[in-house]
Image: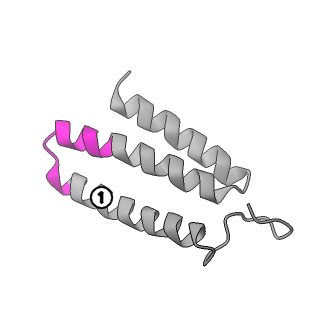
Amino acid sequence: MSYAILGGILLIIGAFFVFRGQIFISVGIYFVADICWVVLAYQQNDYIGMLLISIGMLLGLGAYIKMNTGIMHKTLHKDRDG
C-alpha cells in the first residue's frame, strides 16, 4: 500500500469523525495522514510541499494541544464534551 493510499484512507476516516462531531479524534487521525503526505513529498523531492505540510501539521498539533488542555472544546455537540 502506498503512502498516498494510506493518507487518503486516513483522510476519509478523519472526515468521518468530523461528521460525527468528534474533532479531538479527527485531529489525531489527520496528523497521521499528514505524516504520509510528508513522506510522499520527500519521495518526490518536493521540499516546498514538505514545508507547507509541516506548517499544517504544527497548526493541527497546536489545536490538539489546545483541546487536550481544555482551552477548546473537543466536540461539536453542545450537550457533551468528549
Q: Quadrant of the C terminus?
A: bottom right
Characterize the magenta stretch by its predominant secondary structure: helix
Residue 38 percent location from the top left of the image = 28, 46
Q: Quadrant of the N terminus?
A: top left
Q: Residues within 10 Å of mark 1 (few under 14, many from 20)?
A: some
Quadrant of res 62: bottom left
Q: In this image, 59 relative to 38: left or right?
A: right
Quadrant of res 45: top left
- Most extreme residue toward the bottom is 71
- Most extreme residue toward the top is 1
- The structure residue drawn at horizontal position 56% and vertical position 40%, both measured from the top left corner, is 12
Q: In this image, 2 relative to 12: left or right?
A: left
Residue matched to label 1: 54
What stretch of residues is rendered in magenta? 37-48
- Most extreme residue toward the front is 69
- The structure residue drawn at horizontal position 35% and vertical position 32%, both measured from the top left corner, is 3
Specify the amino acid type for callout 1: Ser
- The structure residue drawn at horizontal position 51% and vertical position 34%, both measured from the top left corner, is 9
